[in-house]
Every structure is written in structure tokens, then in C-alpha cells.
Image (cartoon, rainbow, N blue to C red):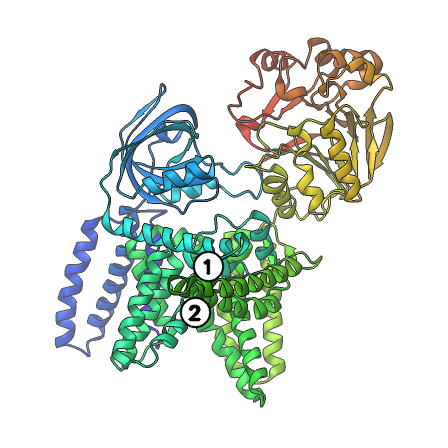
Amino acid sequence: MRDYPIIKTSILFVIGILSNQFFEIGIIPLLIAFVFLASTFLLHKRTENNFHFQLVYLLLSIFLIFSAGNILAGMNKITFDPEINSIDKVKNTTVVGEVTKIDLKRIDQLNFYIKVDSMYSDEFLITENLNILCKINGSKKLIKNISDELKPGNKVKVSGFYYKGREKRNPGEFDYDAYLKSKNILGILNISEFADKDIIDSKTNFIPNLIYQVRVAIDDQIKKNNSAETAALLRGLLLADRGEIDYQTKNDFINAGVVHVLAVSGLHVGYIILIFIFLFGRFNLYLRSILTIAGLIGFMLITGIPPSVFRATVMAIIIILAILMNRSTNLINSISIAAIIVLVFNPNEIYNPGFQLSFSAVLAIGIILPYMNSLLDKWNFKNRLVKYVILFCAVSLSVQIGTLPFTLLYFNKFSVVALLTNLVVIPLIGFIVASGIVTLIISLILPFIAVYFAAANSLLVSLLLYIINFSGNLSFSFISINDYTLTDLLIFYLLLTFLLYFLPRFETYKSKLLLIIIVASNIYVYSAVDDVELMPENLLSVLMIDVGQGDSFLIKFPNGQTALVDAGNATTTFDNGERVILPLLNYLGIAKVDYGIVTHIDSDHYGGFVSLVLAGMINQIYKPELDSTLSKDQRFEEFITQEGIPVHYFCEQKLEIGDTRLYFLYDENIKEISSRSTNDRSGIFKLYYGKTSFLFTGDVEKRMEKFFSKKYNNFLDSDVLKVGHHGSKTSSSQDFLDLVTPRISLISAGYKNKFGHPVKDIIERLQNEGSIIYRSDLQKAILLRSDGNSIDLINW
């Protein structure tokens, strides 16, 4: 620490920022401390050898830095009026305000941000200073026209459907609403193609508008020169906009352990510096340094100034200035200065995952890499290429160790193939970035030659994506790590600090290896202390997944096998299978679903199965008999047959899974009785575990309820009822409920859905039965657990 004076200041400053979550220090104590510090400093100069003055000076300095962090965090704390924050879904909402930022346009969407002057509807009026994210969806032509007209600084009046960001509604799910709030954004205004969009005042903000126009020009040139696949990646690498990289590709990058290359950071800034050194190499040191600094600032501006780029740019400028002034510098002090500057501008960045990953990566290179270098020096490699490859692996390993806790905390995955994949991907990204920049420059002068550079770059991108797809989809690509908490993160870093402190004090390789094994074992053991398995074996767990207006239930049997009953809807804008259920299964450590049960062929029940089947997550499927009159049923069956998934049709049968008994309730005459209603052909089944029972009814309606009531009578009696058809008035007849007598009722419905599910009459009918009602629209995902004697609600 003696060699890193700035890091002491940055650590105290960061602790001060974090302490604001628990208490606030007023400005008066800070001023008093400052006066005492100034006085002590003057006295300290006169009595340098006085220990007491030195101690007081040190303590006051610590308090001053700590208080500065605490007070600055308090001044920048983001809070929303609870009454305003409670507004969730409102039609016909109008927003008047100034456009502060515009994202690069996508094919069919444009996002921009408004600083609100007023926001109103029939239900509310807001005149507070708030920020709103606006989304316009429409044709390519419409998006282009609006993108051309709209400028940062414009005063606009727009109308649309207002809603909050999606909250954490299922275990392990990303809390988009909290993310927006951390950016001081209240919510989202979805503007339809035909809604009113008026520019009240066309005045612009010069610098933001200039940056935006440059970004748009670069984006247009990238799209003009490159294929859609290459353009999407280059836009992410050069302009820090990953909006057009598809979800599956991003997921492959995560699985392969190389998602960091998609976040414009120090890696990309390093490539930019190399390009500038190549371009300005013949100039003298001062001119070359000034041009490089100007180029770095320009690159930072056109990327939108994300924290990772700001950090890397500040560090690079500090190092360049130190060289110019013939002053020594080091990585730890440089990153500490960068951290202080970033946090002074915005203390809330400390909670940004990008900030945490970026700074932990560089700190790891500065702290862990020297240990590895000292070890490599002793091995004395003769072959220079081998030495560089091993050194590159050491850098990559250092970064992985340093960022591992944050990676596990946010992605719940440990990539097994990351070290090898990075060895190929990082140099390849360098070539792609360099080639992309060269193509941009040449396209301005000799566009007919730029085409050839773009074609070569497309080959590199295709190779990159092939490698990512291959390595990210191996059976051993990653290990799912659940229940990783902040406590686990602190344990990891404390024990890592212990290891790095004592490792140099052990002389032999055997003793060093033994210390590493002991520390790693302790990290593993102590990190597991607070682990809580949501769906443990030897118990029956039933999770009502919140998939909005649809159905999906995950069952984990006592023997560890699983069943997925329906999978929600899948539309062009949101696929529940891909965006909700697949991440949930990964979070829970479920490698494959043993039984996929499609209750009936309605999109809000079977739609999500498509992406799950494509991901290889479904072992076999149970569904109603093929209806040749339904084209969607035919397409679905053709699809699952092509994917090699065994299909079983509903029939009256019993499955014994572990200690449970699953009864499919069926009758050969269902087709005739149900007519053409897909709802009435829903598969109904009852699940027994010990003395407890669960009845699943799909969307079955009153006609079939009456039929099954006559056929199965008291056998329908169950502790838990999955209420039919989302609580619609077409289901849950009184006679049927009198037979089921549910102690608990589960209703799966979308929050403020357009159908009004569940209806008031059904809620009252269930309450009159003495049933406890759990609803996904109000209470999000619901997890029930049975030990065979009783059923408990689990607070996930």
C-alpha cells in the first residue's frame, strides 16, 4: 500500500459513498473537520516530529475523505415520490418535455429520453422533474423519419401507453424497473405508430446534438458497408450500442465467458491507442501525445461515455501525461484516480455492474498479475511466442479471478471454457475493431475499396460468432452457480486478500500450492454457508411462474426430476420461453426438463416451448391429441417431431415419479363433448404426494368441468387448485369448486391484463370456499413446497 497512495483515498471515498445507505453525515461536521484539518496541517508543519499532531492530522484526513463520499452520495441519491412511483400502467398518457438523449435507431424501434415538464392522463398529473424513456415502434420508414427530425434539446409533446419497467417477478430474474430507477428514469412511454408526436420547439443542445449526429453518421456508414450481422457487432464495439445483437448471441457470449468484449472498455481503448500510435508514429512525442489524447476523448464521446470507457480514457490520459512530464506512474494509482473522478461526477456509478466489473478487472491485472509474472520469470521461457501466449493467459486468468464474484452475482454462471476462448476471441476482436475503423475511414475517400475491407471483416465476424456459438454451447461450457450473494462476494475478496498477502512469504512451490488449495477450499465452504436451495430434493416443489397473461408451472419432484406445465406466450417482442423460463431453469440449476406438459394449443400456453425445445431443454412432451383442423397444432407437432422430441397424447393413465403419483384425467369422448374449443380440450391432471394433492386444469371451462365432475366426482378433491382459464368467468363453476374444495388457489394472469382476469365473481366464489388465493398478477411468482403432510408458501 506504500506504493499506492491514491488507492487509500479512493477506498475511503468508496466506503463513504456506501455508508450513505445506512446513515448520512451533515455538512456541518464536514466543515468543522475541514477547519480542524487546516489548523492541524499548519501546526503539523511547525512540529513535524510531534506524534500527537500526526495522529490527529491522519484521523481528520480519514474523516474528511469518508464524509465527502457520504455527503456526495446523499446529494446524488435518487428518490421517487411513492405516489408517483405507484403509477404502473396507464393508457393515453401525454408527456411534454425536453429530449435529453436519443439512442441509435434500430430497424423497427427508436428509443429516446425526455426530461419531463409535465406528464398527464385521465388518472394523474405530474409536474415534477422526472426522466422518461420513450419507445417508438413502427415501420423502417417511420423510424428513419422520426430519427431524422428528432434532436437532443428539442421540446416535444408525445402520447402513448405508460408503464413501469418489469420488476423481478421470478427467482433470479433481472429487475429492469430497479435498473431504470438507478438511472433516474421513472418508467417507459410506449408510443404507437399512429400516436401524436409533436416537436413544440426545435431548439437543440449544441454539444449533445453534435455527438448524436456523429454517432448517427458512423452508424449509417457501418450499416452501409457491412452485413447486418457484422454491423450489429461493430455498432456494439465502436458505438457501445448492443441493441441489434440478438438475445441468443449475447447469451452465447456469456456462456463462453467473453461477454466483456461486448462492453466497450479498456480493451477497446487499448486498441484505439494502438491505432493512434500507428497513425501518429512519425510525429514528435508532444504532438503525438496531444493527438492521441484528443482522439481518446473523441472516441469516449462517440461511445456515449459509458463508465468503462471513461475509466479507461482517464487512465490512458494520466499515463500519457506522466510520460510527458517524466513522472512515474503505476496501474493501481491510475485506476484509483479514475475511480475518484467517475464517482465525483456520479457516486451512484458504484452500484453499476459495468463499473464494478470494469474496475475489478483492472485492479486484478494490477494486483494479481505481478504474482503470476514473478512465477513466469522463474520458468524462463526461451520461445518468445510461447512466452507471450502464457503471459496473455496469465492476464486473462487474473481478470477472471478478479471479476469472478461479480460475474457469479449477476450472471449466475461460471464459464469453464473462458480462458481458452479469450485466447482466440480477444485478438480476433482487435482485428475486427481495427478493420472496422479502417473501413470507415476508407469509405469516406475510396468507397469502392472499402467494400473489400468490409467483406474481409464480415468473414472475421462470422469466424468469431462461430467460435462463440461453439464454445458457448458445449455441454460443459459453464456451471450454473445459484444463491451467490453479497456475503459470498465479501468472503471471496477477504480470503483472496489473505492469499495475496501470505503467498510471497511461502518459499517452496509445494507450500504455495497448499496455501492456494486451503484458501480455495475455504472460499468454497464458507460461500455455501448461506446457500438456500429453492427447490430441494426429497420434497415436492410447485412454482407458478409469472409469464404475464398465460400459464406456466414448474414442478420438481422429490427424486429431482422436473415437469414444466405450459410455457407462456411467445411474441415477436417477448418470448417467455427464452426470456423468462430458460434463465429461471439455469438459475435453478435444472439442465433439462423431464416432462413437458402442453395443456392445450393456445399460444399463451404452448408458445414458450418452442425456444425451450430449440435450446435442448425438453426431454419429452405430453399434449392433447393432434387436431388436424388446427394449423398451429400441425406446425407445432411437425416442429417437435423434427427436433426429435417424443410426443405422448393425453389418455387416462398414472405416472409414478419418485414418491409422487400423477393422474391424467381423460375420456375418449372429449373431442365430441368439447366441440372445437381448445380450452375444453385442456389436459387435466392431479398430483399426489403423501397426504397432499394438486389439481391442474389448464383453461378448461364449465362444460368440461361438469363432465369431469360427473366422471371423477370426489377424486377431484384437492388441497391446491390451479384455477381454470386465469380466473375467467367461463370456468370455476360452483359445483366444480364444491367438489375440489381447494385450501389454496393459484391464479396465473397478467398484471392489469386487457381481459380483466381474474374476475370479481370468481375471486368471491373462491373466498366463500375458504380458499387462500395467490395471484401472479399481484404477488408475482408463487412457490409452494410439500413434505407429504403439509404445504408451505416459500418466500423466494
Residue 788 visible from this viewpoint: no
Q: Quadrant of residue 422?
A: bottom right
Work out whether residue 511 or residue 426 is closer to the camera in this orientation and state it.
426
Q: Is residue 58 visible?
A: yes
Q: Amino acid at mark 1?
A: Leu
In the rendered image, the vertical position of residue 507 relative to residue 751, given as above or below: below
Residue 49, how many percent across, how many down?
Answer: 19, 79
- The answer to whether residue 330 is left or right of residue 795 is left
Name which residue lies at 30% across and 50% down: 73
**Residue located beneath label 1 in the image:** 237
Tell me which amino acid carries mark 2.
Tyr
Mark 1 falls on what kind of element? helix
In this view, the residue in front, 282 or 167, is 282
Residue found at x 63% / y 57%:
469
The N terminus, quarter of image? bottom left
Residue at 76% over, 31% down: 634
Q: Which residue is mark 2?
A: 271
Q: Which mark is residue 532?
A: none
Count of numbered circles in the view: 2
Q: Is 34 above or below relative to 650?
A: below
Crowding around mark 2 (Cα neighbors within 10 Å: few <14, some 14 to 19, many 20+) is some
